[in-house]
Amino acid sequence: MSFRISISGMNAASSDLEVTAHNIANVNTTGFKSSRAEFADVFAVSTYGLSQNAIGAGVRLAAVAQQFSQGNIDFTGRALDMAISGQGFFTLSDKGNIVYSRAGNFGTDRDGYIVNPSGQRLQVFAPNAAGGFDTGRMSDLRIPNGDAPPAATSKVTIETNLPASASVPTASPFDPNDPTTYNQTTSITIYDSLGAAHTQAQYYVKTANPNEWQLYTYIDGTAVGPAQTLQYSNAGALTSPAQITLPPYTPANGSAPINVTLDLGNSTQYGNTFSIQTQTQDGHATGRITGIDISPEGVVSARYTNGVAQPLGQVALTNFPNPQGLQSLGNNAWAETYNSGQPLRGQAGSSDFGMIQGGGLEASNVDLTEQLVNMITAQRNFQANAQMIQTQDQIAQTVINIR
C-alpha cells in the first residue's frame, strides 16, 4: 500500500508539472487563462466507515481549475483588435455552434465577416429602426462592401449674428450679383438624392424698419421662393420665423426635388459685427469606407469618406454564473456546460459586463514568476515521493534478508 501512496504522489506531482508547463507555454497567448491543479486526499472507506487509526491511500487530481482573472490590456492600434476590460466573453459562431472566447484578435475573411484566427465569426446585436440595437437576436458581424448611399439634405441649420448697427444697402432692388444691394451673404453645400453637391446661398438685406431683415435664398444661382422677413426683438433675439420651409428645388440631373427647411431659431442681432456660429446640413454624398471604430460600449461603426459613421452592430457579450464550469475547446474557446449555468447575454458597460477596448488585446494572465515557483515545488514533490519509494524498497529488502 505504501508503494501505491508514493506512486499517487508522483502522479500528482507530474500532473502539477504538466499544468504548470501548459501555463508557461501559453504565457504569450492572447486571452489565455491560466489553470491551477487542485488535489484531494484519498481514503479507502469500508462498509462501516473509517476507524480512528485509518491511514490515507494517497492523493488524486481533483480538478484543473481555470483562473479567469483579468489579463493586462496591450494596445496594438489595429482597428479590429478588441479587449474586454471586466467580465464577459466574446460570443462566436463556429459553423452555427456558439462558443465563447476572451481573445479579441479579429480580422476579416474573404466575404467580409469578422472572424478570429480559427474562422469563428463574431456575434453582434443588429441595429434596429429606432436607432438602437436588437438585443433579442444575434447575427454575424460583416463589413459592408461598396459605397455608402447618399442622403438628400432636408434641414439646414444656420446660427448667425447680424450687426444691429447695419445700414440699409445703398442700392436696390436686390441683385445677388451686386454686393451693394445686400449686407451679408453665407453659403453651404447641400446634396440631392443622387449625392450630387449644390451650393445654397443666403443673402441678408437690412430694411428701413427697426430690427428687420430680408433673407433671400438661392440654390445654384436660382432663387428659391420669395424673400423671407426676419424680425428681431429689441433685445436681439429672433422672434419670427424660427424655421422656414423652402419651396422644392429640382436639379437638372434627374434627382428628386430637394426639400429644405431652414432652422434659424438661434440667430441673433447684436453689436456691429457679422459672425457665423453654426452652419450645418443633414445630407451627404456617397462615400467609401475608410475605417472601423469601436466604442467602449462595443458599438462597431463603419467610417466613410463622406463623414458618415454607420453602426454595424453592438458586440454581444456573454457571462456565466460559474465560468469555471466552462469546457475548454482549445484555440482560446470555451463551450457552455451544465456546470457553467445558463449563458447571460448583454451589452458592454451594462450590469455584469465589462467595457470594450478597441485597438487592444488582453494578454495572458499567466504570472511567469509564480509558475516558475510552482515548477520548483512540483519538482521537489516528485523527488520526495520518489525518495519515499526508494526508502520503502530498502525496508522491504531488509525484511527479505532476515534469516
Image: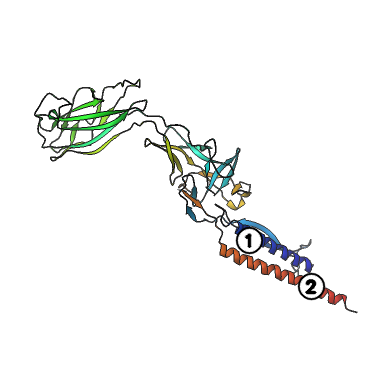
x and y percent of residue 253 in the render? 34, 21
Residue sitting at the far bottom:
403
- Vertical placement of 176 versus 92: above or below? above
Describe the element under mark 1 as helix, strand or loop. Answer: helix
The local crowd at label 2, few if under 14, some if 14 to 19, many if 20 or more residues have their Cα within 10 Å, is some
Q: Nearer the viewer, mark 1 or mark 2?
A: 1
Question: Which quadrant would residue 299 be assigned to in this image?
Answer: top left
Which dot marks residue 20?
1
The residue shown at (59%, 47%) is 333
Q: Is residue 203 visible?
A: yes
What residue is pinned by disc 2?
Answer: 392
Residue 159, given in percent of the width and then of the height, sits at 23, 36
Instruction: Give the amino acid type for the residue marked by disc 2 in the picture.
Output: Gln
Task: Please state which of residues 294 and 339 is positioned toward the viewer in this rendering.
Answer: 294
Q: Where in the figure is residue 91, as x and y percent of width and height?
A: 55, 43
Quarter of the image for residue 204 reads: top left
